[in-house]
Image (cartoon, rainbow, N blue to C red):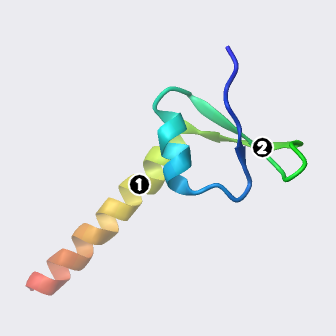
Amino acid sequence: MKNKPVRINSKMTDLLTLAISQNFIPVVDDHGIFIGIIRRREIIEYYANLVEKENDQEDNLVN
């Protein structure tokens, strides 16, 4: 199985799209050289933190 890589300057939405079908996403630099991996779990945690922050902000506005 080949996992599609993203470039270092990719947007989080690009990562989320790939994470639907890949457990991890390889990251490459501008020359196509492998520099690391982002796990699906890390992407989910990132978005979960965003939702939590938004909910906290909404709670603060209501109170």
Q: Which residue is mark 2?
A: 36
Q: For this rendering, which residue is in front, 5 or 62?
A: 5
Q: Quadrant of the C terminus?
A: bottom left
Using the image, determine if residue 48 lies above or below residue 18. below
Place residue 44 in its image quadrant: top left
Q: For this rendering, which residue is in front, 36 or 28?
A: 28
Label 1, label 2: how many angstroms apart (C-alpha)? 20 Å
Residue 49 as seen in the image, left or right of residue 3: left
Q: Which residue is mark 1?
A: 47
Amino acid type for the residue under numbered disc 1: Tyr
| Count of labels in the image | 2
- Residue drawn 45% across the image and 50% down it: 45
Using the image, determine if residue 27 lies above or below residue 51. above
Using the image, determine if residue 59 lies above or below residue 26. below
Q: Look at the numbered disc 1 and give the secondary structure of its residue.
A: helix
- Residue drawn 41% across the image and 54% down it: 47
Q: Look at the numbered disc 2 and give the secondary structure of its residue.
A: strand
Q: Residues within 10 Å of mark 2 (few under 14, many from 20)?
A: few
Using the image, determine if residue 33 lies above or below residue 12. above
Q: Quadrant of the N terminus?
A: top right
Amino acid type for the residue under numbered disc 2: Gly
Contact, mark 1 vs mark 2 (Cβ under 8 Å): no
Place residue 62 in its image quadrant: bottom left
Residue 40 as seen in the image, left or right of residue 44: right
In the picture as drawn, the residue positioned furthest to the left comes out as 62
Residue 50 in picture, x, y percent from top left = 38, 63
In the picture as drawn, the residue positioned furthest to the top comes out as 1
Residue 24 in picture, x, y percent from top left = 61, 33
Q: Earlier in the sequence, mark 1 or mark 2?
A: 2
